[in-house]
């Protein structure tokens, strides 16, 4: 029972379905073509044979008429001549001929099996030839003259307007069937060869099409088991199967990258949470067990408070990211210049604390753009905060805006450490911080630039970074509504 179920499942697979479908269609096409060709060719050959027999019968009838009108004294010569005519006609055709008088009596025949017998043609055949349309065609035993049905055509013998008799051309139907037996044998042999070739071609095609699908099934099972390194073999196919394999590999790469980012995220957030929580727990235990002297408790309680607030800010930033990613963006027109001024004013205290000089190149006229004002203001604020944090003390900070075509370009530039080229693509990843920033930026989380990238992706805008000779510039674009006069 189990073996039968296994065989049933096997034949329900795509390979066998396609194989049987192709084989069935080929077989049906061969049968229809064979039947059509058989019917057409049979009718054509039958018509040709009928016309041939009728023409020979008319010739004999025409040549026999003068001899049937002679006197009785010339009967012997007449019979010999007619027999010669019938014999000559038989040599010209596969049929036998019967020359009959107007009463249906067979006067002579080229059929040796009827020689010496008294044979009379049935009245219905005679009547149809003499009193009908002047011809006859059919399959009959000719009044049981023959044991089996024969293919018979008949024409009248006419002379001087008188109907003197009839001529019948008779052919055994088995002779007609010999042609079709040969045809059927050739047809079945050809059909077997075509079917075999179709089966082989269908099998190879089905295997070629289903093999990548089978590989995909195995790959998905491997992914489900946690193995994300499996890839499909791409053999250069440019059909749908090749595109599917390429797309599958792209999806696998994306899944692997997502998994890598997930692991990095967990590792980074564990790192970010571990330090303040360890500090909080350590100092709390020290106060409780008396390790920390009472006169220093206030100092360490302040550290615990600062670390708690840092954890709160980290969680808030993560919630901000979650909200931004799930946000349904509502675009509206707003003045980008005004947003830049507000962000710059919000950073005034931090800028002053670092002793930075600000070079603000913001046009006096409005530059109207399309987007979410609050989110874009947050982008500018985050970029300024990042630039202030990593700028060299007493250096110059630049915030500027200019338009290029239908795009407004906002640039934030500072002077400080040069960012290595290989690290620039990583700046916008979650929790990414360079080794130098880890030592200098105790309050950073590596989420500010990730938020910037997320917001700009929602707006379908781009951001670029350059860092050379200690000068680092962040520039992002916005779609303008009407051109400003910024230069």
Image: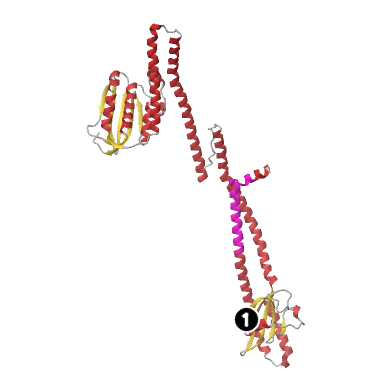
Percent across and percent down for residue 457 are 38, 34
* Residue identifier under label 1: 135
Q: Is residue 28 left or right of residue 381?
A: right
Percent across and percent down for residue 223 are 54, 34
Quadrant including the N terminus: top right
Percent across and percent down for residue 205 are 58, 48
Q: In which quarter of the view is residue 147 placed?
A: bottom right
Colour scheme used in the picture? secondary structure
Q: Nearer the viewer, residue 71 or 308?
A: 308
Looking at the image, the residue that sits furthest to the right is 116
Q: In which quarter of the view is residue 371 placed?
A: top left
Percent across and percent down for residue 348 are 27, 22
Q: In which quarter of the view is residue 403 placed?
A: top left
Looking at the image, the residue that sits furthest to the left is 364
Q: Nearer the viewer, residue 255 or 412?
A: 255
**Is-magenta flag for residue 32?**
yes
Residue 43 visible in the shown view:
yes
Q: How crowded is mark 1: few (under 14 residues within 10 Å), some or many (20 or more)?
A: many
Residue 450 visible in the shown view:
no
Decide: is 131 above or below 290.
below
Q: At 46% across and 22% down in the image, what residue appears?
A: 270
**Is-magenta flag for residue 211?**
no
Decide: is 333 above or below 307.
below
The part of the chain drawn in magenta is: 8-35
- Element on which disc 1 rests: loop
Q: At 56% across and 42% down in the image, what residue appears?
A: 213
Q: In this view, does 183 lie to the left or right of 378?
A: right
Dominant SS of magenta comes to: helix
Q: In this view, does 471 lie to the left or right of 254?
A: left
Q: In this view, does 310 lie to the left or right of 85?
A: left
């Amino acid at each position: 029972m189990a073996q039968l179920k296994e065989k049933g499942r096997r034949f329900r697979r795509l390979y066998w379905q396609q194989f049987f479908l192709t084989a069935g269609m080929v077989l049906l096409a061969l049968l229809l073509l064979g039947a059509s060709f058989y019917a057409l060719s049979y009718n054509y050959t039958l018509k040709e044979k009928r016309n041939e027999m009728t023409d020979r019968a008319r010739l004999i009838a025409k040549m026999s008429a003068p001899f049937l009108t002679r006197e009785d004294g010339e009967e012997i010569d007449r019979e010999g001549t007619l027999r010669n005519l019938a014999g000559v006609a038989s040599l010209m055709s596969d049929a036998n001929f019967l020359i009959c008088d107007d009463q249906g009596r067979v006067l002579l025949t080229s059929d040796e099996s009827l020689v010496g017998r008294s044979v009379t043609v049935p009245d219905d055949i005679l009547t149809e030839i003499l009193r009908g349309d002047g011809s006859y065609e059919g399959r009959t035993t000719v009044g049981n003259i023959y044991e089996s049905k024969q293919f018979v055509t008949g024409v009248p013998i006419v002379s001087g307007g008188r109907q003197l008799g009839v001529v019948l051309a008779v052919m055994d139907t088995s002779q007609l069937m010999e042609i079709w037996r040969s045809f059927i044998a050739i047809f079945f042999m050809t059909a077997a060869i075509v079917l075999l070739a179709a089966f082989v071609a269908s099998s190879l095609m089905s295997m070629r099409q289903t093999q990548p699908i089978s590989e995909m099934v195995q790959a998905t099972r491997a992914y489900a088991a946690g193995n994300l390194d499996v890839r499909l073999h791409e053999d250069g196919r440019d059909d749908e199967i090749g595109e599917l394999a390429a797309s599958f590999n792209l999806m696998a790469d994306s899944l692997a990258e997502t998994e890598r980012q997930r692991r990095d995220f967990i590792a980074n957030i564990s790192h970010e949470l571990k330090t303040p929580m360890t500090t909080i727990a350590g100092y709390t235990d020290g106060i409780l067990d008396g390790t920390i002297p009472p006169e220093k408790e206030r100092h360490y309680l302040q550290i615990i408070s600062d670390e708690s607030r840092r954890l709160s800010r980290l969680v808030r930033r993560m919630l901000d990211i979650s909200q931004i990613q799930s946000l349904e963006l509502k675009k509206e027109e707003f003045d980008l210049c005004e947003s830049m001024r507000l962000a710059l004013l919000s950073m005034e205290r931090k800028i002053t604390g670092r002793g930075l000089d600000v070079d603000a190149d913001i046009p006096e006229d409005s530059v109207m753009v399309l987007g979410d004002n609050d989110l874009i203001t947050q982008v500018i604020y985050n970029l300024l905060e990042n630039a202030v944090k990593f700028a060299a003390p007493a250096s110059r900070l630049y915030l500027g805006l200019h338009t290029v075509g239908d795009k407004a370009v906002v640039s934030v530039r500072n002077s400080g450490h040069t960012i290595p080229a290989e690290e620039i693509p990583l700046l916008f990843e979650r929790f990414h911080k360079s080794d130098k920033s880890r030592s200098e930026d105790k309050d950073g989380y590596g989420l500010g630039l990730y938020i910037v990238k997320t917001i700009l992706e929602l707006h379908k805008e781009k951001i670029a970074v350059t860092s050379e000779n200690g000068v680092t510039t962040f520039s992002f674009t916005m779609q303008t509504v009407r051109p400003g006069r910024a230069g």
